Amino acid sequence: MRCDVCGNDYDKPLLVEYQGRDYSFDCFECAIAKLAPSCGNCGIQVIGHGHEAGGDIYCCAHCAAQAGHPEMRDRI
Ligand SMILES: [Zn+2]
Ligand SMILES: [Zn+2]
């Protein structure tokens, strides 16, 4: 199977179904590059839960607050 990101042909691909589409990747790095949402404020790719506010996703509460969601807080 070929990786959807870098085109590497790998015999044990990661197969991911996401939002109704099938993807194949040779490594998590490529999967993240393709599928991870980016922060609505700073644009960094959000890996893990992130913070969702108003339909957008943010890497941290600080970014959510900067984008107009001051109710978001990092858990301590
Ligand atoms: Zn790849
Ligand atoms: Zn951010």
Image (tube, rainbow, N blue to C red):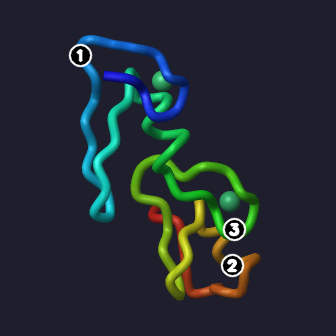
The residue carrying pointer 3 sits among few (fewer than 14), some (14 to 19) or many (20 or more) residues within 10 Å by Cα, namely: many
Q: Are marks 3 and 2 in contact (CB under 8 Å)?
A: yes
Q: Which disc, if any, is residue 63?
A: 3
Q: Which disc, if any, is residue 54?
A: none
Q: Label 1: which residue?
A: 12
Amino acid beneath label 3: Cys
Helix, strand or loop for disc 2: helix
Question: Which residue occupies 46% across, 16% down?
Answer: 8
Label 1 and label 3: CA atoms lie apart by 37 Å
Residue 52 position, x and y percent, is: 48, 74
> Which corner quadrant holds the N terminus?
top left
Closer to us: 18 or 53: 18
The residue carrying pointer 2 sits among few (fewer than 14), some (14 to 19) or many (20 or more) residues within 10 Å by Cα, namely: some
In this rendering, position of residue 67 left or right of residue 30: right
Q: Are marks 1 and 3 in contact (CB under 8 Å)?
A: no
Amino acid beneath label 2: Ala
In this rendering, position of residue 12 left or right of residue 46: left
Closer to us: 30 or 45: 30
Q: Nearer the viewer, mark 1 or mark 3?
A: 1
Amino acid beneath label 1: Lys
Helix, strand or loop for disc 1: loop
Image quadrant, ligand 2: bottom right
Q: Earlier in the sequence, mark 1 or mark 3?
A: 1
Q: Earlier in the sequence, mark 2 or mark 1?
A: 1
* 3 relative to 34, above or below: above
Label 3 and label 2: CA atoms lie apart by 5 Å
Label 2 and label 1: CA atoms lie apart by 41 Å
Residue 10 position, x and y percent, is: 34, 13
Q: Label 2: which residue?
A: 65
For label 3, being within 8 Å of ligand 2 is answered: yes
* 33 relative to 68, above or below: above
In this rendering, position of residue 67 left or right of residue 15: right
